Image: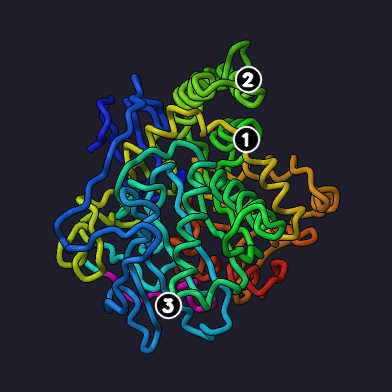
Amino acid sequence: MLLSVVAGLLAVLPVTPALAGQIPVVNGVLGGVPSPVSSAPAKVKAAAVASSTPTPGKLRVVENSGVCETTPGVYQASGYGDISSDESIWFWFFEARNNPDTAPFTIWLNGGPGSSSMIGLFQEHGPCRITNDSSGVTLNPESWNEVSNMLYVDQPVGVGFSYGSTTVGTSQEAASDIWQFLQIFFSDSRFSKFQQRDFAIWTESYGGHYGPTFAAYFLQQNAAIANGSISGLPINLKFLGVGDGLTDPLAQYPGYLTYAASNPYHPLLSDSSITQEANTAWTQSGGCRDRITDCYNGGTEAACSLAQSLCNERILSPLSGNYDEYFILAENPDPYPPDLTPYLTSETLMAQIGAQQTQWTETSDTVYDNFASTGDWMRNSRPDLETVIDSGVRTIVYDGDADYILNFNGVENMTAQLQTKFSAQFNQEQFTDWTVAGQPAGMFKNAGTFSYVRIFGAGHEVAAYTHGSLAYGQAALQMFTQIMSNSSLFST
């Protein structure tokens, strides 16, 4: 998720997790930058839960563990793709409940940076969902594997159940590792039949960086395979979904000022001096806007990291007031979605599914710190998003209207600034009411193969929420189903 239900291996200031968020609070600052940041590679070790030795270029797999997906006849597999002798990436795969032999194939990635994709699996749209007391799971009838084969991946190395040398600190480096992982995955005889399926990347939060960067990289790799400059298996990329994402900070950071003062529910602050200070921090010479602009204009890692530090300390962090940054209808911290830690740190469970990481955590401090040191947060991923849209990949950007941390004001400003072959049409379109089973669920726009939807009543993890009489995740499943059917959004 950058961002959902939010020991450092570096010698840095302590990081305090939020109950319902993927972005760490560093020294009191949401999305802060540790100081000093160590550049020494760290290593996340495997546990002795199961004996399994990495073999570079191969998968280690536990099939049909019986955990999570209990629908009769639905295949699942979990385990590791070993991209080197010292880098093991965790995955959990679920075949589609309906027509798995023809259904498309989706990889889901949470954000952070450094957050586990078990968040998406267990809190949002996987075949099961964590119970409110965090003690177990229940079957999810609104799971996205109703219509797609689903692959949940903990990345980069060091995140969630993945383990090994944690050297990745940019979205581009992460894209390369996931490409390598997918080459291994699709080369395995158990999964090779999926290689030519329509392929989708769905992601959220820091996925506003991951999604466009990964998709553009995959397209580049496919072109290189086609012209013979590299060897490999092409990935049949057809869809990209980005939820509540950080894509273009320069376009999105003014959204914090707007949303804090006026959103569909309530102002976030009663102290106008905080808002005035944040506005000054944005506009003043050498302030947040200037720092992000410097980063965009070839800024060094240090300059971009400084932009993250300044903007999050003076704008993002203070403007949420006492409300939960991920769901403003609750005060901070919101205990929903429920904490996954008690469930996923059970040694019995880990043995069942073949997990070997020493201690699952929602967000890896080490990986987060790596990204903070490179300034990747403040890089602009919008050009990659434009490339992907113009390439013919059907793309949707979506946002929950009760999410502050990547609010719809900022995201909609980003979409309005896109420069694609559909942008003129998109910006001329008016928002249309979006209904799900006849119930008001949001507002949307379509233009060509690009869509955007603002979903009512949803926080940062859109599929975790409900609105009105709809079921939890029902609106999100309708959105997912329509896009994965190669359709623009429409009301039902």
Above or below residue 344? Residue 297 is above
Q: Report which residue position mark 2 lands on.
A: 294
Q: Amino acid at mark 2?
A: Asp
- Stretch in magenta: 137-147
Q: Are marks 1 and 2 in contact (CB under 8 Å)?
A: no
Judge left or right: residue 395 versus residue 194.
right
Q: Report which residue position mark 1 lands on.
A: 380
Give the image location of residue 10, x and y in percent.
Answer: 27, 30
Above or below residue 92? Residue 180 is above
Give the image location of residue 144, x and y in percent.
Answer: 49, 71
Residue 190 disc label: 3
Give the image location of residue 233, x and y in percent.
Answer: 57, 64
User: How many numbered callouts?
Assistant: 3
Give the Cα distance between marks 1 and 2. Answer: 11 Å
Query: Looking at the image, which residue is at 32% across and 37% down?
Result: 365
Task: Check if residue 142 falls in the magenta segment.
Answer: yes
Query: Looking at the image, which residue is at 61% across and 13% down?
Result: 284
Task: Check if residue 489 falls in the magenta segment.
Answer: no
Q: Nearer the viewer, mark 3 or mark 2?
A: 3
Q: Looking at the image, is mark 3 or mark 1 earlier in the sequence? A: 3
Q: Are marks 3 and 2 in contact (CB under 8 Å)?
A: no
